[in-house]
Image (cartoon, grey):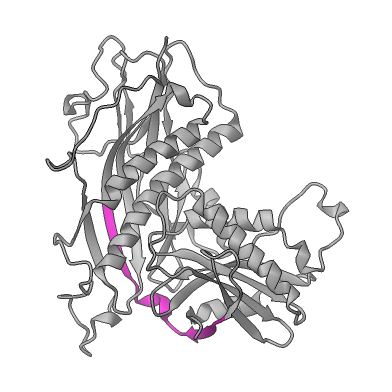
Amino acid sequence: MGRTYIVEETVGQYLSNLNLQGKSFVSGLLIGQCSSQKDYVVLATRTPPREEKNESLRPPGDKLDDVDEEWATEHAKQVSRMLPGGLLVLGVFIITTLEMGNDFQNVLRRLVFAMEKSMSKKRLWNFTEEEVSDRVALHICSSTKKIFCRTYDIHDPKSSAKPADWKYQNGLSTSWHSLECTVHINIHIPLSATSVSYTLEKNTKNGLARWAKQIENGVYLINGQVKAEDCDLLEGQKKSSRGNAQAISHSFDVRVLTQLHLSSDHRSTATVQICSGSVNLKGAVKCRAYIQSNRPKVKDAVQAVKRDILNTVADRCEILFEDLLLNEIPEKKDSEKEFHILPHRVFVPIPGSAVMLCDYKFGDESAEEIRDHFIEMLDHRIQIDDLEIAEEINTACISSSMNTEPSLDNTDDEQQPKEPIKTAIVLKIHQNIGVIAAFAVGILAAGISFHYFSD
């Protein structure tokens, strides 16, 4: 028996209203959450048309072979950054003017696998063996209104299409449970002199992978309590007047405890490494995850939070490196320091839903730009007043102690402002190990610091 997809009714309305604009097909993404029994689809978004200078010289595509796989996978990669913990790109849809033969299945299959490959490259986590590995390919004929729903196993490159059920349900998005936490991070990533051939981005990702193990092995307190993995997340929660706790959307506060030292039964060895520099990330990160209300388990909630923590840190680094490359900012030398602030997180509500998506905003970007980017990527209009800036720089006080020579680990509270504000993850580059600058910023401005050591 194939999988069942429970779909928010507004998704069906969105797909029905999509205008092919004279084209023979339009494609896009399906977003939602997997569970062991069934999958839930809360959002659909068409892939925006690609703008090219010579687009007018190209003949209009009238075959499925003309699906721009590269552009579609890039869209999936961008959208995956905008999803909080618990939500995934579940698959793709394609709407055609005519019913097509089996040849279109090859196109959809290729698209599903290409998207998953693109999105998995940036992940700091892996799917577990127990998790659902099926991804959906939905085909709708605009003239006959027929729906063909099939799935592919992304863990099996040779998998064939399996039929699946596609069922609409009103109000699916209104009763999701949210989990929120603030994670304080302090990550030191040495850049080995033997890995100079690696890009800075690759070196940083390798360092983040080591930190990711700490997050994976952490202890997670839900509303101040440690709960058994197989325990019902809603155990002890207030029930509705009908005696059903599932019908109420609950919000949970999550705190993360990570292990500082190995226990006595672990043997460890020290490694001496010649380094050409280092990357430092320090600050507080706002995280949020969502779980569908159909008997959620503690292990599913904790997993969603873990992945949001890992995703948001990795995504910010990736966005910063893309921005540096796009603007071709040169490296500074001769003991100069370079300070960058990573984009901070902005949450955006889905109209008529309890679920919020997110985006990332650099300090010089306006709310209008965030709105326009949201519309472009997700094809849904939002109001600027609905933007929730979870991490906003209220003040920025940058000071440097160029004459002092503390060690890399000597970042005392004395260097920080006396006001109760949170430290930022900052980025600074300089070539002298003996010079450390102290930075203090208001409520989270995420950033990184690079240190390059002179010979």
* Residue lying furthest bottom: 242
Give the percent coordinates (x, y) of residue 297.
Answer: 27, 72
Residue drawn at 76 percent across, 49 percent down: 52
Front residue of 238/397: it is: 238
Give the percent coordinates (x, y) of residue 408.
Answer: 27, 22
- In magenta stretch: residue 29: no
Quadrant in which the C terminus is drawn: top left
Picture quadrant of residue 159: bottom right
Q: Visible in this render: residue 215?
A: yes
- In magenta stretch: residue 169: yes
Depicted 447 relative to depicted 231: above or below: above
Residue drawn at 80 percent across, 71 percent down: 22
Depicted 365 relative to depicted 333: above or below: below
Picture quadrant of residue 98: bottom right
Highlighted magenta segment, given as a residue range: 163-181
Q: Is residue 145 left or right of residue 288?
A: right
Give the percent coordinates (x, y) of residue 357.
Answer: 44, 60
Depicted 23 relative to depicted 388: above or below: below
Front residue of 69/125: it is: 125
Residue drawn at 39 percent across, 65 percent down: 129
Front residue of 63/331: it is: 63
Give the percent coordinates (x, y) of residue 196.
Answer: 50, 24
Q: Visible in this render: residue 19?
A: no
Residue drawn at 71 percent across, 55 percent down: 50
